[in-house]
Image: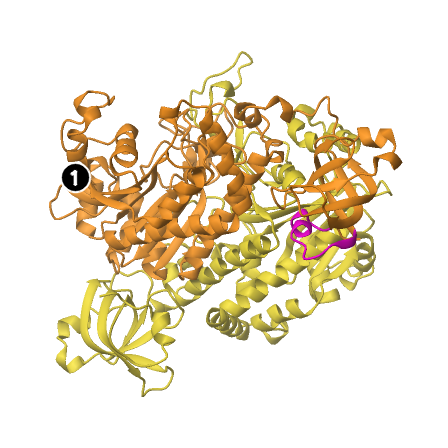
Chain colours: A orange, B yellow
Amino acid sequence: MKHIKVKDLLNSAKPLDDVLVKGWVRTFRNNQFLAINDGSTINNIQCVVDFENTSPEMLKRLTTSAAVAIHGNLVESQGAGQKYEVQVTKLEILGDSDAETYPIQLRNKPSLEFLRENAHLRVRTNVFGAIMRVRSVLSFAIHQYFQEKGFVYVNTPIITGSDAEGAGEMFRVTALPATGAPLNEEGKVDYKQDFFGKETNLTVSGQLEAETYAMSLGQVYTFGPTFRAENSNTSRHLAEFWMIEPEVAFNDLDANMDLAEDFIQYVIKYAMDRCQDDLAFLNQRLADEEKQKPTAERSEMGLLEKLQFVLDNNFKRVSYTEAIDILKNSKPNKNKKFNYIIEEWGADLQSEHERFLVEKHFKCPVILFDYPAKIKAFYMRLNEDNQTVRAMDILFPGIGEIVGGSQREERLDVLQQKIADLGIDEKELWWYLDTRRFGTAVHSGFGLGFERLVLFVTGMTNIRDVIPFPRTPQNAEF
Amino acid sequence: MKHIKVKDLLNSAKPLDDVLVKGWVRTFRNNQFLAINDGSTINNIQCVVDFENTSPEMLKRLTTSAAVAIHGNLVESQGAGQKYEVQVTKLEILGDSDAETYPIQLRNKPSLEFLRENAHLRVRTNVFGAIMRVRSVLSFAIHQYFQEKGFVYVNTPIITGSDAEGAGEMFRVTALPATGAPLNEEGKVDYKQDFFGKETNLTVSGQLEAETYAMSLGQVYTFGPTFRAENSNTSRHLAEFWMIEPEVAFNDLDANMDLAEDFIQYVIKYAMDRCQDDLAFLNQRLADEEKQKPTAERSEMGLLEKLQFVLDNNFKRVSYTEAIDILKNSKPNKNKKFNYIIEEWGADLQSEHERFLVEKHFKCPVILFDYPAKIKAFYMRLNEDNQTVRAMDILFPGIGEIVGGSQREERLDVLQQKIADLGIDEKELWWYLDTRRFGTAVHSGFGLGFERLVLFVTGMTNIRDVIPFPRTPQNAEF
């Protein structure tokens, strides 16, 4: 007999005889009301146990997280809070869960930190079940958005022999022994004897490879893991995270901004449409959390309000030069409240400045563009002023930078000069330069850090809580 | 003025005035007929150049792979082979492509090997454009299949501190210096000083982590990169490849087989529906290639026939024991044509045996199940005979193993014994064993090698040709 998912039972159009439910016990009240969850929805199905005809031994085994199979009839519920419940006719324990040793005791309100150490079990709580379902739906929305528009999904390499991306510190990948690796004549490790015959690292970005594909397939996107070996123990950084990188031939920076804004609004709307129960729960969770804070520190909007706000409002587009003017004349700058005082054009913006612009000044998502060339990557299109590049960062309230992108430098000679100025050997990038040698054209793209998007949509505040098994300094458990 | 994609022009319902096309030159015939492709489809739009009113210098620049912007009118074509063409009114070169130095000279029929060395440019050919579009559509079909069924997409970790998966040789991931890494008291590398505080590797499978999620969310799947540091220089192996791993609570092996078969048929049908032009081209390519072979070696079916055959026929389900009987009594075994002669029950099947079963004996996809425990992984469910496990492999013609899966051992004591027998420290798998300690239940899953599926659907024969930038021994270019 096939079991029916909890979600389908709760959405049933009519009462049903002889149903089979399989799932895990969430709670068992009054020796009678058994709440079963199977992951198909955040909601439980209430199963009413005929306790007078059930052995005390069996009743004792109905502990949190025990796996059960329940036969019964789906009937309209007399109690408040649910439309249907299952009148149990037969109860089977598939797998016990010892109440004494089961690590997650909900009545003790386990902290997010404690749950992180039990990442294999935390998904059994409402909050992590909700987060992971929302994460999954957002992933699909991303694919659907690009596929509907005719983009080609490209799997750029994870192991890269190219070390010129310059986006951050890299992890080395090797099959050589950890001690006693073969050395070359210079006394350095002889990577010719390593698996790939050269030094290899984990990718920090698929952009350069994606560009080569965009210059033939027109519109492409990546969605895969990327890595940073940076010792950043913050609530916004992971050593391993997922990134989406669209790249579009013939798009200039304006078209790139249009794409990014439309894309973000689409995927947020998709999640709001498809994850109503999970987002309602997360909305309430955040509201409860906010209540613990002093009134002055509470955010002005609830989670669902904040998401709707992003859908209803255009992102404010502001040039770097305008932003510097705003910051220079801002109260926290004049009162020296910023850790880094903005004194002149050319300064790199810190998280505190970005947050001021988004959360205090504009109070909406902001796209900053046309940054000084000196603080941005070599592949960005130099403007006619020879000072700024066609870069853009999208800043979100509570999150900071969620997107970084640019129009790419399509002129071979300008790009070669930039590479030379950085002291990068042009031979390292022969294939990248080929895109400018043969049929070059204006093109643009951006990278969106997926976990930052999930943070924003779920209202969580630590990035370690929105990826199943976070990788951070000193932590690669599971 | 916004340009229109080639695909949309070719599908236009009516002629259009004043259109703008952007793309790359594929061919230029008779100083007049310019074939432009922009990656949106395998088909080119023919643009008719008014050569009498175009400068000879401009005409010379219309070389293969030059990027162009073309203004003109979309009119019904007088010539055969296309419904519409563009009568060019204005021609603009966006980026030249020097015919002397452009590496891919189609008239020289570049070999697949040569194109592999130019993986950044090979996507500009019809065959690789088609492959990569099909690959992308298959990726989406996979997500859509699982999402429609309510599965949750789980990103299991790429960097793993767990070394008990046992699926193959692993790449080490480290941020320590290649020479002079700090040593501990035993004279071994002190991984406590490495980034994660322990030895870490690239994942060979997300299964164990996915199981922990399935035991709460019910139905989950992974789709991400996996790695093998095996020195296999074959047309079927990559060091970095993408794998799909669904895992389902309460599914036994029969349900697992049903899921795998339904899933594969769904994604193949999806690609056949959405990639008709690309698959027609690849069908013809394979037919042309087959013509070069002696008649006896030609395959009986064309590509599209073969795909349709998989949709129309159930996969043949055969126990390992039955398969051994068939092999033992087969002609190549009796005539000692196999490299590995099958002598008795318990033998591990080689690729030659799998191909015999699929291609000669059954002539359809085959699911082998109930393998000897000794040749399969520790986590597979032991049958009541104490000899075989609830494993399954799906074998495809021309590809061999495309899926490997099993019902998982859900009994804590049996699993602990297996782990002890293998000499694995139980502490390494504490979190995996927790799934059996708390609410264990029957569950099953499988892994499908994505590139092998793409090989099958595109009719290509070397796995390096179905991933954008292949990673193989001595090769990590780009």
**Residue B344 magenta-highlighted:** no
Query: Residue A298, located in which quarter of the rendered image?
Result: top left
Q: Quadrant of residue B336?
A: bottom right
Vertical placement of A430 versus B24: above or below? Answer: above
Part of the protein shown in magenta: A4-18
In the image, taking residue B410 as reference, residue B164 lies left or right, namely: left
Mark 1 residue type? Glu
Q: Nearer the viewer, residue A59 or A248?
A: A59
**Which x, y percent locates residue B231?**
55, 43
Q: Position of residue A143 (x, y in %)?
A: 46, 53
B263 vs A25, nearest the viewer: A25
**How many labels were placed on the picture?**
1
Looking at the image, which residue is at 32% across and 40% down? Answer: A165
The chain identifier of the residue carrying mark 1 reads A
A128 left or right of A404 in image: right
Residue in front for this viewpoint, B392 or A249: A249
Residue at figure coordinates x 22%, y 31% from the top left: A348
Residue at 25% over, 49% down: A408
Question: Is residue B225 visible in the rendered structure shown here?
Answer: no
Where does the C terminus of chain A fall, quadrant-wise? top right
Which residue lies under the disc numbered 1? A322
